[in-house]
Image: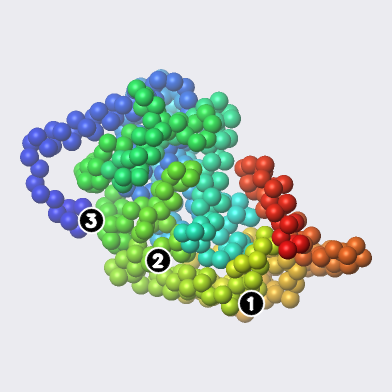
């Protein structure tokens, strides 16, 4: 039984074909590992496909002699910091056991070759800083500002560092042609004729997808019939999918060709790109009632992005049009978020993010809104997130800027917007567009 659906009995031919396919996949993984000295980076999102991939890698390498295990294996996971709390608990436990078993058993002869890494976005790229601090509207299909900042950039940075140390690297992904027509086309488009590897958008990085020919049913069969090598119970994974109505997992996103998420998926609990979060609705319907405040908050975020009364009439770029959330709305979002945090008993926003939000508000000239006061009013606790001296200095800098701009006949808001644009470009992998962006912004000032 997979996801509550009972399979029809398999005949001997089907069993033999399946076993042969698994054996051939393991052999292919072994051959590719022994082919060169390039490090492996195994994408692990905790979903069914990435779990099946990592299982196959564990079993394939465990059948090799220790003397053959000479190159690094990195298990790479990504946490956007707004993942479903239930899924985060599940994945974090797995990462710990993967690290333990990988170092003490699989690579016991040289533990330094095995790495388990969870990347997170930079502080300036986090969801709450951009939504509450800068007032970015809740993401939708046309303005999905979150994917690059929270997923692509952190994983790409880790891959790039690995490539720089070794010259090249191979990324293992659990992508399958059976997933969708678009996924099949994408795999074929980047294939290198006669080779297992396909090109990746990052220079000197290649993708190896051992599961590409496996079907969805075969993946589930493998997970339910073969013991998990790092000791996890795969039935817990089955139950997680069953509770979420068998949704498509949110994959490890490493570039813009990787689908960020499907229409219904495990992923960010605040995601407003989809109309309805069916995965969270499924979990609530199957017993996880504590998630209801999360769902209600997500739905509210999706609703207010289309309310023009809650948005500025100018974008942060200075151009006319629906801009960021107004300051009272940003304050309300923070208040509601902290209330939800109280209700569910999970930390949903860190103190570092709260401090960064206060600094961003101050940078924008909004000194009369205090994150610490909001926190104390909602949570009943006092926190020191921004030193009073720093806050006072920022206020003084803002006043000096305004005074100098008045003397020079310059709009201080325009100068601050250019400073903000420069600061935003600091987090980009490529900064070659900064001058064009600045020219566009300056042109918007004189319209």
Quadrant including the C terminus: bottom right
Question: Which mark is first along the chain, 1 or 3?
Answer: 3
Task: Find disc 1 in the rendering and name its residue.
Answer: 328
Question: Which residue lies at the image location 56% right of the left edge and 46% below the top edge?
Answer: 153
Q: Which mark is residue 275?
A: 2
Q: CA distance from mark 1 to mark 2?
A: 25 Å
Question: Which residue lies at the image location 70% right of the left edge and 67% below the top edge?
Answer: 361
Residue 33, given in percent of the width and then of the height, sits at 39, 25
Q: Which mark is residue 3?
A: 3
Q: Nearer the viewer, residue 328 or 335?
A: 328
Does residue 103 appear anywhere in the picture?
Answer: no
Q: Is residue 304 above or below residue 217?
A: below
Q: CA distance from mark 3 to mark 1?
A: 45 Å
Q: Where on the picture, by quarter, is residue 215?
A: top left
Q: Are marks 3 and 1 in contact (CB under 8 Å)?
A: no
Residue 284, given in percent of the width and then of the height, sits at 34, 69
Nearer the observer, disc 1 or disc 2? 2
Q: Residues within 10 Å of mark 1 (few under 14, many from 20)?
A: few
Residue 260, given in percent of the width and then of the height, sits at 44, 51
Q: Residues within 10 Å of mark 2 (few under 14, many from 20)?
A: some
Q: Nearer the viewer, residue 358 or 66?
A: 358
Does residue 259 appear anywhere in the picture?
Answer: yes
Q: Where on the picture, by quarter, is residue 73?
A: top left
Question: Which residue lies at the image location 29% right of the left edge and 26% below the top edge?
Answer: 27
């Amino acid at each position: 039984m997979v996801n509550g659906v009972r399979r029809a009995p398999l005949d001997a031919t089907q069993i033999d074909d399946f076993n042969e396919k698994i054996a051939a996949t393991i052999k292919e993984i072994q051959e590719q590992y022994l082919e060169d000295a390039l490090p492996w980076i195994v994408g692990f999102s905790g979903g069914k496909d990435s779990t099946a991939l990592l299982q196959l890698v564990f079993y394939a390498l465990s059948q090799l002699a220790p003397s053959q295990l000479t190159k690094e294996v990195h298990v790479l996971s990504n946490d956007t910091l707004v993942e479903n709390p239930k899924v985060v608990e599940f994945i974090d436990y797995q990462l710990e056991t993967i690290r333990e078993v990988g170092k003490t058993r699989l690579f016991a002869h040289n533990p330094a070759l095995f790495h388990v890494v969870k990347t997170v976005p930079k502080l300036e790229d986090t969801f709450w800083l951009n939504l509450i601090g800068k007032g970015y509207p809740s993401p939708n299909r046309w303005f999905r500002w979150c994917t690059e900042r929270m997923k692509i950039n952190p994983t790409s940075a880790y891959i790039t560092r690995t490539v720089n140390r070794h010259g090249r690297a191979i990324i293992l992904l659990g992508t399958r042609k059976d997933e969708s027509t678009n996924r099949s086309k994408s795999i074929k488009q980047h294939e290198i004729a006669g080779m297992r590897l396909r090109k990746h958008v990052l220079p000197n990085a290649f993708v190896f997808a051992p599961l590409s020919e496996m079907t969805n049913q075969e993946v589930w069969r493998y997970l339910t019939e073969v013991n998990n090598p790092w000791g996890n119970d795969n039935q817990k994974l089955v139950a997680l999918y069953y509770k979420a109505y068998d949704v498509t997992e949110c994959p490890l996103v490493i570039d813009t060709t990787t689908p960020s998420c499907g229409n219904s998926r495990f992923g960010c609990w605040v995601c407003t790109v989809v109309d309805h979060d069916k995965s969270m609705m499924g979990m609530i319907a199957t017993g996880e009632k504590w998630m209801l405040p999360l769902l209600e908050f997500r739905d509210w975020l999706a609703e207010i992005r289309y309310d023009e009364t809650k948005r500025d009439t100018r974008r942060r770029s200075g151009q006319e049009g629906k801009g960021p959330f107004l300051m009272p709305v940003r304050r309300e979002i923070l208040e509601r978020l902290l209330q939800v945090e109280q209700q569910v008993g999970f930390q949903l926003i860190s103190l570092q993010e709260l401090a960064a939000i206060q600094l961003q508000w101050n940078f924008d000239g909004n000194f009369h809104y205090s994150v610490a006061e909001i926190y104390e009013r909602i949570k009943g606790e006092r926190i020191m997130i921004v030193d009073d001296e720093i806050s006072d200095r920022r206020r003084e800098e803002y006043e000096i800027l305004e005074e100098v701009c008045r003397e020079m006949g310059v709009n201080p808001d325009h100068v601050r917007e250019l400073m903000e644009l420069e600061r935003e470009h600091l987090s980009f992998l490529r900064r070659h567009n900064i001058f064009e962006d600045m020219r566009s912004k300056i042109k918007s000032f004189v319209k």
